[in-house]
Amino acid sequence: MPPHPRLEAPNTGNSKQDMKYQQQQEKMYAQQEQDHQKLQRQQDQDHQRMEQQKADQARTQQLEQRHQQQTQQMEQRHVQQMQRLEQRMPNGRNQPPRQDEKR
């Protein structure tokens, strides 16, 4: 999965407030990364079980569809989390997200 776009660091002129929002952003990004890793581990285990069971093509396809749905739902939650955090940023400093290669 590609990295999530990152919000610009707030710059309100109040360094304490800016630091608070930056910390909230970093906490959210760390949680989202954990979500990604957990889902990936779960999906990998599902694949291993299917291989061990020599699952037929229909069951394998159902599993893939379920994985795709789980991934989409997780990504939707992450987008909503980012939007909520962005809305809480002071002084309407909602800036467009930037792509940050570091996760």
Image (cartoon, grey):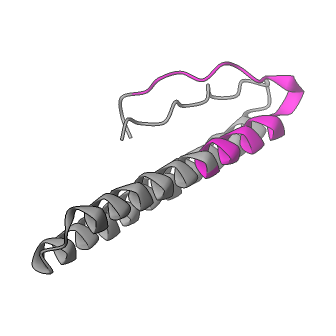
Q: Nearer the viewer, residue 20 or 57?
A: 57
On screen, residue 55 above or below 34:
below
The reply to whether residue 93 is visible in this rendering is: yes
> Which residue corresponds to the image point at 13% horizontal and 71% vertical from the top-left?
51
Percent x, y of residue 59: 29, 68
Percent x, y of residue 12: 79, 25
Magenta span contains residue 85: yes
Give, as a single range, the part of the protein colored magenta.
Answer: 77-100
Q: Nearer the viewer, residue 37 or 28?
A: 37
Relative placement, left or right, of 64 versus 93 is left
Relative placement, left or right, of 64 versus 35 is left
Residue positioned most to the right? 91
Relative placement, left or right, of 60 versus 34 is left
> Which residue corresponds to the image point at 70% horizontal and 42% vertical from the top-left?
21
Q: Main secondary structure of the magenta part?
A: helix
User: Quarter of the image holding residue 25?
Assistant: top right
Relative placement, left or right, of 97 versus 5 is right
